[in-house]
Image: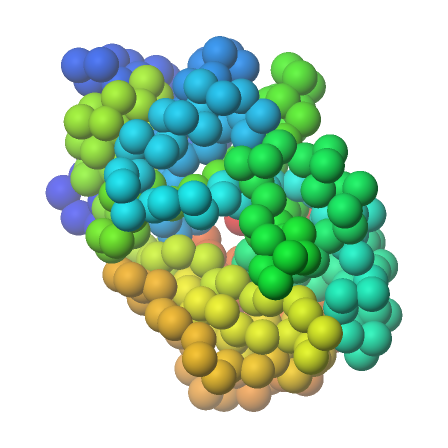
Amino acid sequence: MTISEHGGHIKGPAEVLRTNMVDVGELRDSAARGRATELAVQGKPVGLYNVAVSAILGDGKNRAFVDAVATIKGEKRGQRPLAACLPTERFVEILDPEKISESLHAKFLDARDLAARTGSLCFFRAPITEVAAETLPPSMVSRLDGVPVIQNWDATGHQPTNLLLAQMRNAGIEYPAITSMNVSGQPEIVDQHEAIQFSQEHGLPIFLTDEKTNPHVVGSYTILELNQSGLKLLRAGNIPVDMLRIVLDTPINTDGSTQAKSAIPLSIPDEEMDELKTLDPKTARIAILSALRDEPFPNLDKVLGRDQKNSST
């Protein structure tokens, strides 16, 4: 395997090699994902390039993983919880409708529809029931004014990470957890060369690269919050909020939001954006996912005729 000299992209055959203390494999290679799964079962942190940003993934229920993340992220992390990687169906099951605006119920309590609109596009932070809070690992639950809250990202739509999570679940990891690869307070790592070096310096045993991403879209994911007032933008990231408004067909309050460090969001020509707005939200999501590959924004006529099996990045 060789590493290209531009864009942080990794080129080469699907193999696992050792760079000092770090196994470097390809996220799209089943054997590499299998090795990462074995390590995660042991409570080890797994590094990967997840569409547009490097991340740390592992078993949110395993104390060894939780402690490893705390060490890697440093003192500035404090008691901030890990994000969950639950399928939307499970995420919806644990939501507390009484703590969410009724205006959002039709979209956010229908798991199949919500996944078809938003799968792999953004994180959702939302209130959950007390019963769910008692079931989930403490490392993944926070409280806001006493209300239990989790942050979740469903990988449906990004096939390589989705396959990795499926392997982890099959291996017994019930609560996969994820966080950005960086020391808290520092910019997110968007260059895969830098991510491999970071993994080596901070004791991550494996890093999974991905060459099939759009080098012009980098940075952490957008975070949206569900609350009693409606839908709010907490952090702008690699998918612009205007695109998320299209797929959700819902107003999003942007007051007080922050910007992900090192982020270069997906950008499309004005005429394509105008056409995107005319599409069915689920088709619009497919178009957005297509643009996260290493290609220009897709011809929308082609997207309209594309079947679902080809819609994953």
Q: Nearer the viewer, residue 20 or 303?
A: 20
Q: Position of residue 199 (x, y in %)?
A: 26, 28
Q: How many marks?
A: 0
> On the rendered structure, is 7 left or right of 112?
left
**Figure quadrant of residue 11:** top left
Q: Quadrant of residue 75?
A: top left
- Residue 97 vertical placement versus 179 (above, below): below
- Residue 78 visible in the picture: yes
Relative to 285, 195 lies left or right: left
> Which residue: 78% across, 50% down?
129
- Residue at x 64% of width, y 15% of height: 171
- The part of the image, by quadrant, that contains residue 173 is top right
Q: Quadrant of the N terminus?
A: top left
Where does the image place residue 172, in percent across and percent down from the top left? 66, 17
- Asked whether residue 312 appears in the rendered view, the answer is no
Picture layout, residue 60 above or below residue 127: above
| Image coloring type | rainbow
Give the percent coordinates (x, y) of residue 277. 63, 83
Identify which residue is drawn at 56% across, 56% down.
Answer: 123
Q: Residue reaching furthest left?
A: 5
**Compared with residue 4, is residue 260 higher up or lower down, i.e. above or below?**
below
Query: Residue, x 36% and y 45% (percent of image)?
Result: 78
**Residue extending furthest toward the front:** 146
Q: x, y (%) of residue 54?
A: 35, 43
Is residue 86 left or right of 16 when viewed as pictured? Answer: right
